[in-house]
Amino acid sequence: MSLKLNSLLIHGGVDGDETTGAVAVPVYQTSTYKQDGLGENRGWEYSRTGNPTRDALEKLIADLEQGNFGFAFASGLAAINTVLSLFKSGDRLIVSDNIYGGTFRILDNVFKNFGITYTIVNTSDVAQIESAIDDTVKAVYVESPANPLLTITDIAKVAEVSHKYGKLLIVDNTFLTPYLQRPLALGADIVVHSGTKYLGGHSDTVSGLAVVKDKALADRLYYLQNAIGGVLAPWDSFLVIRGIKTLGVRMDRHVANAGKIAEWLEGSGYVSKVYYPGLKSDPGYEIQKKQADGAGAMISFVLDEKYDYKKFFKSLKLITLAESLGGVESLVCHPASMTHAAIPADIRKQVGIVDELIRLSVGIEDADDLIADLKQAIEASRKEAV
Ligand SMILES: *Cc1c(COP(=O)(O)O)cnc(C)c1O
């Protein structure tokens, strides 16, 4: 029976436990498995190589992303590290000009040392991608919406261009999750996630995921997952499965709250810019509407110069200043000094990650309370008139 997404969130992957009938997939907290004789095992040998709880999560994320093979890792960056390990010295990647700071860091400070290089372009302009492609390029890597400026890239168009030249398209789908956007269905080859964010959803576990359709690519990734070893532990796999069960209801509230807050901010007079692809004024609005089922719940905005951003952060009472995003509680961060500090200042300025930029992960609290907190904190941060 083919299930719709809301049912797959609950019953996708491995539905409960065959052996005992347990409704929740148990935490198989074991490192190894008894072998019945030499070369005879029951499908499980060692938990880096495979673990039933992790396997259930891997099958679940594959179902949700409309892929065929899922992989779970100890963090989003462990997933990205493994995917980037598909490449070798001399290979080059084309990368979105605003991406998660840690992704930039691993490219710039780790893979570059091994001769795998990157070229940054504005991937929302497909022509820029096409003109950067040459023989050394092996893949295009995009986030849409991108972190932290929520820039939208037309995934189907980029897939078409990438494939025209025989390159892979890798999409980081952390900000929307498969509930709102399914990059593989749009033509991407590899989807990566920080499961730490909306999939886990409760700010209580760090995890990463990757999904592909293609069997040959899956074989290579599986080999690398086991060879590199950054796998997700059974308990954390359980927590992410548990988080995913409520993904739909959480995302509905996240998105509704974010829409209200973005509109309020835009008309508030407190900000000089709001970045949110759900606003009609946003340059990504039309493409976002075409390729996703919602605009997500990440909003970035630039405080008007009448207000002191440092004081704003200190004045918030309900919204928490913290790294990360996608949890049930609203979090706010300062990209220039926190999530994106690894990006050199000149590149930051060039793409718009200015010091006054504030990134808000809208939680599932009451939207009116969130707006009231933003309002009082902004008013408390008004600079003294000179
Ligand atoms: C957080 C994040 C990552 C990294 O994930 P970790 O789980 O922190 O390692 C990658 N991409 C995006 C878009 C993220 O927000």
Image (tube, rainbow, N blue to C red):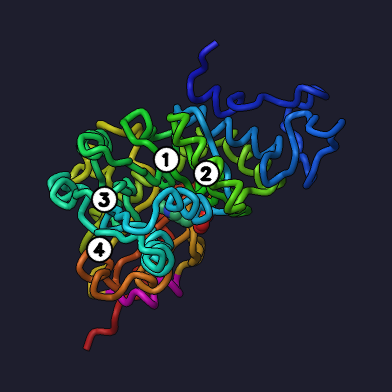
Q: Which residue matches tag 2?
A: 209
Cα separation between marks 2 and 4: 35 Å
Sequence-wise, the earlier of marks 2 and 4 is: 2
Can you tell which of label 1 and label 3 is closer to the viewer? 3
* Residue bounds of the magenta highlight: 307-315
Cα separation between marks 1 and 3: 19 Å
User: Is the residue under label 3 in contact with that under label 2 (CB below 8 Å)?
Assistant: no
Q: Which residue matches tag 4?
A: 271
Cα separation between marks 1 and 2: 8 Å
Query: Residue 41: horizontal and vertical position, in percent?
Result: 79, 31
The image quarter containing residue 177 is top left
Cα separation between marks 1 and 4: 34 Å
Sequence-wise, the earlier of marks 1 and 3 is: 3
Sequence-wise, the earlier of marks 1 and 4 is: 1
Sequence-wise, the earlier of marks 3 and 4 is: 3
Q: Which mark is residue 282?
A: none
Q: Which residue matches tag 1?
A: 191
Can you tell which of label 2 and label 4 is closer to the viewer? 2
Depicted 384 relative to depicted 108: above or below? below
Residue ID at (27%, 69%): 348
**In the rendered structure, which amino acid carries the disc numbered 1?**
Val
Sequence-wise, the earlier of marks 2 and 3 is: 3
Q: Secondary structure at mark 2?
A: strand
